[in-house]
Image (cartoon, rainbow, N blue to C red):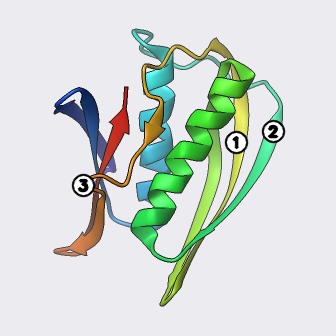
Amino acid sequence: MRPIFRTEGHGADCRVRLYADTLDDLFLTAANAVLRSGLRGKHRPPAAQGEITPVQLEAPDVASLLADWMNELIALSEIAGMVHACIEVHVADRPGVSQCSATLRALPAPWLSPWKAATFHDLWCAKRRGRWQAHVVCDL
């Protein structure tokens, strides 16, 4: 099945629901959710032609890694003032440590997202019925 994300209100925040067959696709889908939040109203992201940024992250579990991943994307976009697209991402989940290695590219579009940070409130990530699912709440 195709990876998807949905956003919904969560009090004064935004809950992002993610679904994918693999962890790599789940993290790519999370990157696409952050990218779409930053484009606010534009339907297609502009062609990737900006600076390339490598990202390496590590966390004690995959849910924490997912929140850290989304925070990294939000922070890079906020600092640069432009959205970032994920070119590739690889996730390794082993007992006691989860790691993410990715390549991002800045896009020539201003960062307009209301998202300020991914939180650990109601954070959840697990494989159910053969498919990865996650819920991440983002502060607005």
* Residue at the farthest bottom position: 95
Rendered residue at 29%/57% (across/down): 134
- The answer for how far apart the CA atoms under marks 3 and 1 are is 27 Å
Mark 3, secondary structure of its residue:
loop
Decide which of tag 3 and tag 2 comes sooner along the chain: 2
Q: Position of residue 79 (x, y in %)?
A: 71, 26
* Amino acid at pointer 2: Ile
Q: Is residue 37 left or right of residue 135?
A: right
Q: Quadrant of residue 59?
A: bottom right
Decide which of tag 3 and tag 1 comes sooner along the chain: 1
Q: Camera-side residue: 127 or 119?
A: 119
The 10 Å Cα crowd at callout 3, few under 14, some 14 to 19, many 20 or more, is few
Is 54 located above or below residue 49 in the figure?
Answer: below
Q: Nearer the viewer, mark 3 or mark 1?
A: 3
Q: Which mark is residue 122?
A: 3
Mark 2, secondary structure of its residue:
strand
Q: Is residue 128 left or right of residue 103?
A: left
Q: Camera-side residue: 55 or 61?
A: 61
Decide which of tag 2 and tag 1 comes sooner along the chain: 2
* Amino acid at pointer 1: Leu
